[in-house]
């Protein structure tokens, strides 16, 4: 959410952001309603001042003057009573439009219509060249009896998986390594629930636009979150932290749920787009300072790159363009790991800076050294999301006998073995 004062003073910049991010919002309509609210409030204030002044006249009024003052006081009260719900209604209209107002992106963010115009910033590692007929991750999984696809679909529906045996343990190895690595980086570690209230999804910006992606449990009026970002962002909502508590670096694990609406029939083979998955997310809450925010963006991006390097995965870093970055983002980078069976890179990590756009929605504040209350800056990035990351680990590290190589960093979490499967 943007500050209304900022919107009023930067109309053209906000309109440009609306166009570039393809947000369905008429800013002139928002500004018109904003002016209506201001006018209504001025009228209410004037009426209240007149009501108070009228009441002050009563003690000194003559018997002849009192009936007129009483009648005027009654008329003012009726006008206030009539006006108040109109103000409330207009404020609600304004709030609904403010929920949609996008963050103005950094001036050097690539301008583009969709993911086809994202910009590659660097490649790290070399895709493997196999001297044998390589398999995709599903074939490797089936060969090693590492998952139930058809049987679990009978129980849970399509795009659900049950990992088995060594691959189930391998998933936890990836998760545990990521949590340990974030701990070494100075993160506080949380495990958070997947169930959240509606206001938490508004707080992060997943609502109102992304409702079709979220599972709802109507009997309890609870939603299943698609990322630990949702509950974690609202943990400190409504509090006023001290500047000395910032920056706050956090690693959070949660189960995640996404409907993946609109993806039916594409990218759904195996582990690619499942409805339930696990994720370790990293967060930073920092001071309302552009330079500090930029530092932390680079730091959490670097951390995820280091995890990919520890997993011995070829990857590239993409800077996401305006048309693909989402309404709340100030800057966004994706890490895409190489998928040999598809001969292309696939997104595995997503790093975002949101400045104070998210903090205004979620009411995340701190008191600075001058005793002024400010909104924080928020940042987040994936540390590891499984099972998708397992696709890259299985395919890039496969051996000719169907086994897969376990990267050195993960071997302590797998009982010291350097290979699994292939028996």
Image: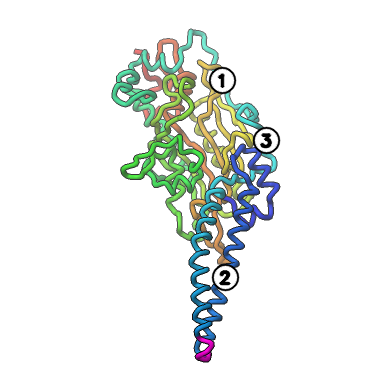
Residue 379 vs residue 156: left or right? right
Please tell me which of labels 2 and 1 falls first in the chain. Answer: 2
Foreground of the two, 94 or 340: 94
Q: Which stretch appears magenta?
A: 61-66
Foreground of the two, 369 or 324: 324
Mark toward the viewer: 2 or 3: 2
Which residue corresponds to the image point at 53% horizontal and 25% vertical from the top-left? Answer: 346
Q: Circle 3 sits on which residue? A: 110
Q: Tag 3's secondary structure?
A: loop
Residue 246 vs residue 7: left or right? left
Asked whether the viewer can see residue 244, the reply is: no
Q: Which mark is residue 45?
A: 2
Q: Is residue 78 above or below residue 298?
A: below
Residue 169 position, x and y percent, is 34, 27
Give the Cα distance between marks 2 and 1. 62 Å
Q: Tag 1's secondary structure?
A: strand
Q: Which mark is residue 344?
A: 1
């Amino acid at each position: 959410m943007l500050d209304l004062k900022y919107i009023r003073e930067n109309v053209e910049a906000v309109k440009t952001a609306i166009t570039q991010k393809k947000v369905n919002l008429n800013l002139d309509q928002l500004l018109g309603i904003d002016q209506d609210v201001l006018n209504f409030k001025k009228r209410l204030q004037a009426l209240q001042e007149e009501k108070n002044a009228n009441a002050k006249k009563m003690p000194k009024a003559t018997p002849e003057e009192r009936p007129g003052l009483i009648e005027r006081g009654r008329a003012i009260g009726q006008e206030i009573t009539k006006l108040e719900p109109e103000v409330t209604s207009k404020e609600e209209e304004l709030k609904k439009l403010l929920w949609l107002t996008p963050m103005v992106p950094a001036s050097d963010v690539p301008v583009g219509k969709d993911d086809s115009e994202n910009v590659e910033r660097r490649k790290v590692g070399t895709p493997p060249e196999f001297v044998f007929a390589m398999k995709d991750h599903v074939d490797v999984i089936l060969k090693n009896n590492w998952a139930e696809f058809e049987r679990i679909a009978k129980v849970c529906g399509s795009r659900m998986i049950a990992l088995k045996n060594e691959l189930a343990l391998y998933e936890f190895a990836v998760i545990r390594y990521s949590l340990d690595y974030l701990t070494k980086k100075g993160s506080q570690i949380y495990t958070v629930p997947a169930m959240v209230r509606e206001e938490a999804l508004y707080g992060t910006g997943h609502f109102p636009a992304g409702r079709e992606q979220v599972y709802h449990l109507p009997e309890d009026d609870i939603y299943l979150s698609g990322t630990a970002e949702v509950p974690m962002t609202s943990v400190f909502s409504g509090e006023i932290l001290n500047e000395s508590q910032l920056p706050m670096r956090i690693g959070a694990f949660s189960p995640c749920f996404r409907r993946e609406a609109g993806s039916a029939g594409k990218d759904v083979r195996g582990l690619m787009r499942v409805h339930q998955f696990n994720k370790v997310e990293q967060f930073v809450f920092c001071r309302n300072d552009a330079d500090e925010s930029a530092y932390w963006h680079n730091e959490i991006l670097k951390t995820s790159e280091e995890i990919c390097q520890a997993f011995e995965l070829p990857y590239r870093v993409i800077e996401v363009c305006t048309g693909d970055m989402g309404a709340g983002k100030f800057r966004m980078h994706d890490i895409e790991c190489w998928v040999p069976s598809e001969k292309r890179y696939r997104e595995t990590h997503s790093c975002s800076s949101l400045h104070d756009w998210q903090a205004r929605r979620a009411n995340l504040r701190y008191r600075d050294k001058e005793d002024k209350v400010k909104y924080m800056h928020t940042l987040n990035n994936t540390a590891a999301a499984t099972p998708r990351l397992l696709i890259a680990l299985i395919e890039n590290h496969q051996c000719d006998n169907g086994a897969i190589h376990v990267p050195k960093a993960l071997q302590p979490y797998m009982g010291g073995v350097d290979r699994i499967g292939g028996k």
